[in-house]
Image (cartoon, rainbow, N blue to C red):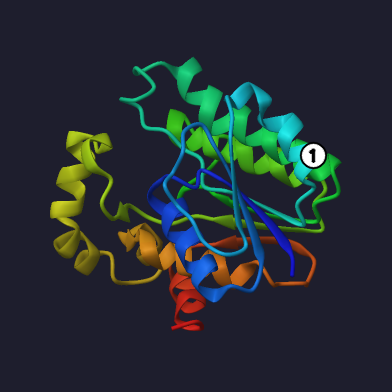
Amino acid sequence: MAKLLIVGATGLIGRQLVARLLDEGVHEVVALTRTPSGISGANYNEQVAPVEEWPALVAAIQPDCIISALGTTWRLAGKSEEAFRAVDQHLVLAVMAAARGAGARHAISVSSVGADASTRTFYLRVKGEVEQSLAALGFDRLDLMRPGLLRGERGSERRVGERLGILLSPITDAVMGFVPLRRYRSVDSAVVAAAMATLVDRASEGSFVHENDDIAALAKRIK
């Protein structure tokens, strides 16, 4: 039984990933949250603490695998680049570095299609910078999830443009049904969670990028 530590367990992907892992009942699942999630189950442990305390808690937990589904939105960050980076970059890297320092050999992190440290697009540039920093931490295995537009119940956190994109996704997905545009198609958050669940047991070493086609193929293996 491996010890899996999940940060972002109360978010769109994280909550579904925790539920799937608990249903499988194979591993010990630890979630680090800012507020109680209401999740419970066998082999589940939740630690609630301010984010400033997370790196120390991660070091104490000593996970075998660290999984990040952390992420905020431009609106929730107050349209501030600094506030956005505080969650999507600095907090993610602080937790991942603490896990690596505590002996974690495997990391899985949700990024985004189009992540590129050299792009002018702020969101995608941050995601690309995070990917580069994660690779530099030296995990034996690193899995980077790059889904397209995520479908799923996110409530009021959705931006107007994001909501419109989801409404139009059946049309845009049809247009983008050909390689290489398929990687930009929308994808259900439950599919991403299912794909991530299949990766926790992977023993092969290296750095792996999973875009829409690969995410869908991984998810099908456990249905």
Q: From this view, report whether residue 172 is shown above or below residue 93.
A: below
- Where on the picture, by quarter, is residue 206? bottom right
Q: Name the foreground residue: 211 vs 28.
A: 28
Classify residue 54 as left or right of residue 89.
right
The disc labelled 1 sits on which kind of residue?
Answer: Ala
Location of the C terminus by quadrant is bottom left
Q: Tell me what residue is drawn at x 77 percent, y 72 percent.
A: 203
Q: Name the foreground residue: 223 vs 10.
A: 10
Q: From this view, report whether residue 80 is shown above or below residue 195.
A: above
Where residue 164 appears, x then y in whole percent?
15, 45
Q: Name the foreground residue: 189 vs 22.
A: 22
Classify residue 205 as left or right of residue 35.
right
Where residue 142 appears, x then y in whole percent?
70, 56
- Where on the picture, by quarter, is residue 116? top right
Q: Which residue is mark 1?
A: 60
Q: Tell me what residue is drawn at x 80 percent, y 44 percent.
A: 100
Q: Tell me what residue is drawn at x 77 percent, y 36 percent.
A: 98
Classify residue 144 as left or right of residue 17.
right
Q: Tell me what residue is drawn at x 73 percent, y 39 percent.
A: 58
**Pointer 1: residues within 10 angstroms few (<14), some, or many (20+)?**
few
Q: Dot 1 lies on which element?
A: helix
Where residue 11 appears, x then y in whole percent?
41, 45
